[in-house]
Image (cartoon, rainbow, N blue to C red):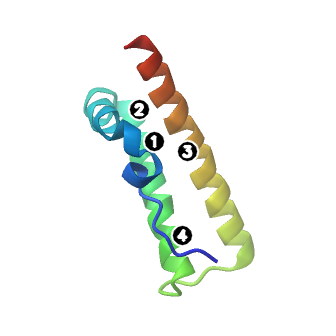
Amino acid sequence: MSNTPHRLADEFPEHVALLRRLREEDRHFARQCEEYESVNDKIHLAETDIQPADDMHMTEMRKSRMSLKDAIFQALSRQQAVE
């Protein structure tokens, strides 16, 4: 079990400036990032036993985080291709 926080800046270090800019310019993208961070924080709290969760709930949260991360990466990739 990992207890690494998985922050977006750590997941996409080459896109930190683009992440920041898109969060300011694109409300949908900003909401996806906020949702990712919320789920990620809940996972981290569960992994460190601060707020334990059962295996099924952990699996669902991890799937949600992965789906959000994929959507964020796709948006970053589309924007980078345009620039």
3 or 2: mark nearer the eye: 3
Query: Could you tell me how far apart the alpha carbons at marks 4 and 3 are, in whole angstroms?
Result: 14 Å
Residue linked to disc 4: 43
Disc 3 secondary structure class: helix
Give percent across and percent down for residue 8: 42, 50
Which badge, 1 or 3, comes first in the chain's sequence?
A: 1
Q: Residue lying furthest front in this view?
A: 14
Which badge, 4 or 3, comes first in the chain's sequence?
A: 4
* Residue 79 against residue 73 in the figure, above or below: above
Which badge, 4 or 2, comes first in the chain's sequence?
A: 2
Q: Which sits in the foreground, 42 or 15?
A: 15
Query: Could you tell me how far apart the alpha carbons at marks 4 and 2 are, in whole angstroms?
Result: 23 Å
Amino acid bearing label 3: Leu
Check contact, mark 1 vs mark 2: CB within 8 A: yes
Residue linked to disc 2: 28
Amino acid bearing label 2: His
4 or 2: mark nearer the eye: 4
Check contact, mark 1 vs mark 3: CB within 8 A: yes
Amino acid bearing label 4: Ile
Q: Quadrant of residue 38?
A: bottom left
Check contact, mark 4 vs mark 2: CB within 8 A: no
Q: Using the image, tell me which numbered label, if any, was put on residue 68.
A: 3
Residue located at (62% from left, 45% from top): 67
Give percent across and percent down for residue 15: 38, 37
Give percent across and percent down for residue 80: 42, 21
Disc 2 secondary structure class: helix
Amino acid bearing label 1: Gln
In the rendered image, the quadrant that contains the N terminus is bottom right
Residue linked to disc 1: 32
